[in-house]
Amino acid sequence: MGEKLQKVSSKSLWISTLAVLVLMSIQAWSGNWITFFLILPGGSGGLSDQFLKAMAGLSVYHAIMGFLIGIGSIIVLIFAFTSKSSIYVRIFAILGLIITASAAMGGVLFTQSGYQDRWPLGQMADSFVGAFAAYLLQLFFMNRTHNLPWAKQVKQAS
């Protein structure tokens, strides 16, 4: 039973880490659009009302994606500790969660300032870069042996 649990945990760690990275990529894209067209001074000048409504809807989507990434980061951390992973994988899973929380805190502070305080906006952007790097490094250390958990082992004939 222990071997089967390890395989499931290992596969789940790969899937959840890749899912968090994909969600973070989409999150960054939506955040850039919101910043360029809604928040920066003069960003909404000359744009149609329909486009501005779409950007406002994108900001709600951005917040929902933030919650999903936070939940995903917790799931990655759980699987990093339940699978037979190296200490580096566990360290980067912890760092990814902490830095993701820092990005969320920046987002909360930025919205509480009425989108006026630029420091939390920078915190959110810089934390995204840090969390993305942490999860990419985690993937690197997960793949150090070049054996994906679902890859078939080729037996050599003697």
Image (tube, rainbow, N blue to C red):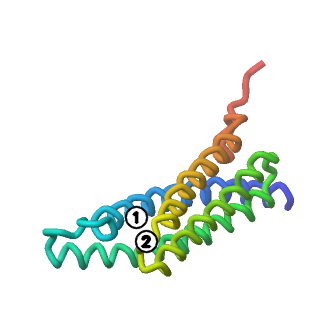
The residue depicted at 68 percent of the width and 31 percent of the height is: 154
State the image quarter where residue 54 is shown.
bottom left
Q: Earlier in the sequence, mark 2 or mark 1?
A: 1
Q: Residues within 10 Å of mark 1 (few under 14, many from 20)?
A: some
Query: Among all residues in the image, which is located at the extreme right?
Result: 2
| Residue 6 location, quadrant | bottom right
Tag 1, which secondary structure?
helix
Q: Percent from the top left, x then y, of residue 12?
A: 66, 59
Q: Amino acid at mark 1?
A: Gly
Q: What residue appears at the point 30 percent right and 70 percent down from the top-left corner?
A: 38
Name the residue carrying label 1.
31
Q: Who's the residue at 61% across and 67% down the image? A: 72
Q: Which is more toward the observer, 147 or 143?
A: 143
Instruction: For marks 2 and 1, give the CA distance.
Output: 7 Å
| Element at label 2 | helix
What residue is pinned by disc 2? 62
Q: Quadrant of the C terminus?
A: top right
Where residue 30 appears, as percent x and y from the top left, is 38, 64
